[in-house]
Image: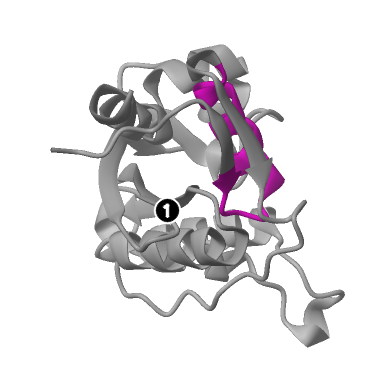
């Protein structure tokens, strides 16, 4: 039987403010008081896993152990069919600026351009289908974990459209939608996103 999550504090094992905002919005109705790993000064573990599930578990367990509280981690990324599923677990790495490109950090427009450049090399008839994948891992300080996965299918557009959202949202148009994730109001995105679908499974199992 799946262990239940009770109202109270929960660590969001992320230093990504966009993710923390989305997760906080999704958990709000359930009496959970999210606090980010960044605000607690918890270190970010090296994401050495080769799957979303492995990386989510690494992050959740690190925050749960360090804080003594239940911790929720999200590992998510973009899988592009024509690129063999890349960037996948390396989605954020594709946005990392090198030392010779300016201050360290992430440049998502550079990352989107890299994806588009690789697609362009395959010609105008390239398959532009893609999916956002989200794996959630909830960990307790005693080491118990549980995983949930959600997917949002769609296609890639160019040039980027919209200023809301984060990451690759400006180039991802979900299936049966006329707008990219970055053009949608947050509530509309939350209703159909990969993260929302994973959360539906989490809420059904844990509350």
Residue 16, percent from left and from top? 66, 51
Q: Is residue 68 magenta?
A: no
Is the residue 133 above or below the residue 67 in the image?
above
Occupied quadrant, residue 196: top left
**Extreme residue in the bottom direction:** 100
Which secondary structure class fits the magenta region best? helix
Identity of the residue drawn at 60% across and 19% down: 186
Say which of 105 and 82 sits in front: 105
Q: Is residue 20 magenta?
A: yes
Residue 188, percent from left and from top? 51, 13
| SS type, badge 1 | strand
Quadrant in the picture for the N terminus = top left
Occupied quadrant, residue 105: bottom right
Identity of the residue drawn at 56% across and 30% down: 8
Q: Which residue is mark 1?
A: 77
* Any part of residue 47 in sight: yes
Residue 135, percent from left and from top? 34, 48
Identity of the residue drawn at 42% across and 80% down: 48
* Any part of residue 158 in sight: no
Is the residue 5 above or below the residue 19 in the image?
above
Identity of the residue drawn at 73% across and 56% down: 38
Segment tinted magenta in the rendering:
11-28
Q: How is the image coloured?
A: one colour
**Extreme residue in the left direction:** 1
Q: Is residue 61 left or right of residue 114?
A: left
Q: How dense is the environment of label 1, judged by Cα within 10 Å: few (below 14), some, or many (20 and up)?
A: many
């Amino acid at each position: 039987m799946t262990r239940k999550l009770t109202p109270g504090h929960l660590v969001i094992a992320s230093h990504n403010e966009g993710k923390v905002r989305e997760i906080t919005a999704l958990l709000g109705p359930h009496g959970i008081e999210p606090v980010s790993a960044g605000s607690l000064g918890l270190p970010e573990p090296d994401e050495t896993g080769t799957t979303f599930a492995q990386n989510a578990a690494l992050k959740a367990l690190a925050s749960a152990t360090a804080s003594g509280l239940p911790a929720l981690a999200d590992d998510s990324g973009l899988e592009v069919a024509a690129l063999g599923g890349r960037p996948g677990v390396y989605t954020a790495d594709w946005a990392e600026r090198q030392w010779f490109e300016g201050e360290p950090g992430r440049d998502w427009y550079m990352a989107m351009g890299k994806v588009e450049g690789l697609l362009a090399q395959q010609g105008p008839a390239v398959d532009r289908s893609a999916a956002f994948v989200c794996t959630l891992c909830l960990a307790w300080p005693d080491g118990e974990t549980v995983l949930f996965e959600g997917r949002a299918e769609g296609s890639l557009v160019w040039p980027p459209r919209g200023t809301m959202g984060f990451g690759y949202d400006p180039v991802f148009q979900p299936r049966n939608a006329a707008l990219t994730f970055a053009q949608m109001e947050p509530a509309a995105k939350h209703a159909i996103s990969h993260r929302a679908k994973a959360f539906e499974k989490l809420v059904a199992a844990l509350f």
